[in-house]
Structure formats: structure tokens, C-alpha cells
Image (tube, rainbow, N blue to C red):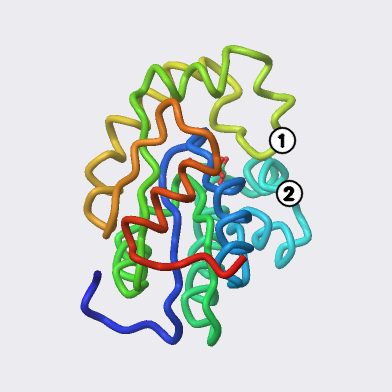
């Protein structure tokens, strides 16, 4: 557990695209009786634009700025939240410092080939919120894997290997490893 205390005992899920942060996070929050927030959805809500629209109209830097502001607000929430952080949330050093103030930061990880299988070689463009994977998705994921592994490790209080696990199994592992009990 990280030493600094945040306003409420939030649990933040981090990890690359395809690790199941949003699906796991939503169900985990329900199990714990906590609220749920997905940073991409929140970016959408506060900006009135989709992730893809922000990337295309204003560029990645602007997206990362809004993402940072959303994370700042999320970390200040006064009641417990499960927060699904988007894959790139660890890129900014100030975000990593914020993450270290959350009580639990769970890194959902899997071998690269598993993530590539999950994301697939399909027409990623149909997947609205992942413009970074429009071209050469497998290569892009590999680059991200290499560039970000140490960043996820830096902020994580717990690491879960999701390879071969169903959503419920991932949730059980998280609950076991952080020592929290489901309320439903
Ligand atoms: C990104 C991950 C996406 C989304 C955007 C950038 C990244 O979120 O924020 O496409 O840089 O890894 P998910 O991790 O929820 O897919």
C-alpha cells in the first residue's frame, strides 16, 4: 500500500489496452459497493468529445492534458471509487505521482502475445477510442508494452496476470490480493 493518504480509499486499475480494465473495474466496483469511473468516459463527459475526436481535432497532447485533469479530480473524490485508468495514464510523471497517492493501484498485466490476440488484427478503426492502434496495432502495442512496463511497475501496489482468466477470476484475484471483501 502506498504511504500517502488520498481522500478516500480509491482503487485504480492500470495497464495496457486490452487488459480488461473497464469491464473488470465496473464489476469490481459493484462487488465492493463502490462507485465506478472510467477516465476515457469521464474525458468524453467533460470535453463533450470522444477520445477519437480529441486526438483527431486537437492532438494527443491536448488529450493527455484533459486526461490529467480528469485524474486529478478522480483522485480527490470523497467517496471510494474504482477508477479504470486508460492505458496511457502512466505516461506523465505528475500522473504517476497522483497514482501513488491512491490506496490501491492494481496493474492488470498479460504477456504481449495475449494482448495482441485480445485486441486482434481486426479493423481497429472501428474501435472508436483507440486511435493509436489504427495503423499496425500489433507493432504499436509492442512499442507501448516496452515503453510502459516500468511505468506501470512504478505506480502499482499490486500486479495481476490476467492471462487465461475470466473477468470473475480477475476480480477474485484482486479482492484476494488487496484483502477486501465483496459486499454483493
Ligand atoms: C490509450 C488508451 C485508451 C485511450 C486512448 C489512449 C493509450 O484507453 O485512452 O486511445 O495511450 O494507451 P484504454 O486503455 O481504456 O483502451
> Is disc 1 surrounded by few (<14), some (14 to 19) or many (20+) residues within 10 Å?
few
The answer to whether marks 1 and 2 mark residues whose Cβ atoms lie closer than 8 Å is yes
> Of 89 and 12, which appears nearest the observer?
12
Q: Which mark is residue 140?
A: none
Could you say whether the residue bearing mark 2 is in a helix, strand or loop?
loop
Report the quarter where the N terminus lies. Answer: bottom left
Q: Which residue is mark 1?
A: 128
Q: Write the residue at 48% across / 50% down.
A: 171
In the image, 4: left or right of 19? Answer: left
Could you say whether the residue bearing mark 1 is in a helix, strand or loop?
loop
Q: Is residue 137 above or below residue 6?
A: above
Q: Write the residue at 62% across / 55% down.
A: 26
Quarter of the view holding residue 79: bottom right
Q: Write the residue at 21% across / 78% down.
A: 3
Q: Position of residue 112 (x, y in %)?
A: 36, 23
In the image, 117: left or right of 98? Answer: right
Q: Position of residue 158 (x, y in %)?
A: 29, 54
Q: Which residue is mark 2?
A: 50
Quarter of the view holding residue 16: top left
Distance from label 1 to label 2 (Cα)? 8 Å
Amino acid at each position: 500500500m502506498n504511504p500517502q493518504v488520498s481522500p478516500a480509499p480509491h482503487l485504480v486499475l492500470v495497464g495496457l489496452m486490452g487488459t480488461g480494465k473497464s469491464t473488470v473495474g465496473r464489476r469490481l466496483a459493484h462487488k465492493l459497493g463502490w462507485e465506478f469511473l472510467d477516465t476515457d468516459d469521464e474525458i468524453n463527459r467533460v470535453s463533450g468529445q470522444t477520445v477519437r475526436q480529441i486526438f483527431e481535432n486537437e492532438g494527443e497532447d491536448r488529450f493527455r492534458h484533459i486526461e490529467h485533469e480528469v485524474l486529478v479530480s478522480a483522485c480527490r473524490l470523497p467517496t471510494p471509487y474504482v477508477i479504470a485508468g486508460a492505458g496511457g495514464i502512466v505516461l506523465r510523471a505528475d500522473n504517476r505521482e497522483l497514482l501513488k497517492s491512491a490506496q490501491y493501484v492494481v496493474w492488470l498485466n498479460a504477456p504481449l502475445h495475449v494482448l495482441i490476440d485480445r485486441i486482434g488484427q481486426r479493423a481497429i478503426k472501428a474501435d472508436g477510442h483507440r486511435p493509436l492502434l489504427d495503423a499496425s496495432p500489433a507493432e504499436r502495442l509492442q512499442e507501448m508494452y516496452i515503453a510502459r512496463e516500468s511505468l506501470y511497475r512504478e505506480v502499482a501496489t499490486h500486479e495481476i496476470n490476467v492471462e487465461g482468466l475470466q473477468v470473475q477470476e480477475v476480480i477474485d484475484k484482486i479482492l484476494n490480493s488487496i484483502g477486501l471483501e465483496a459486499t454483493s
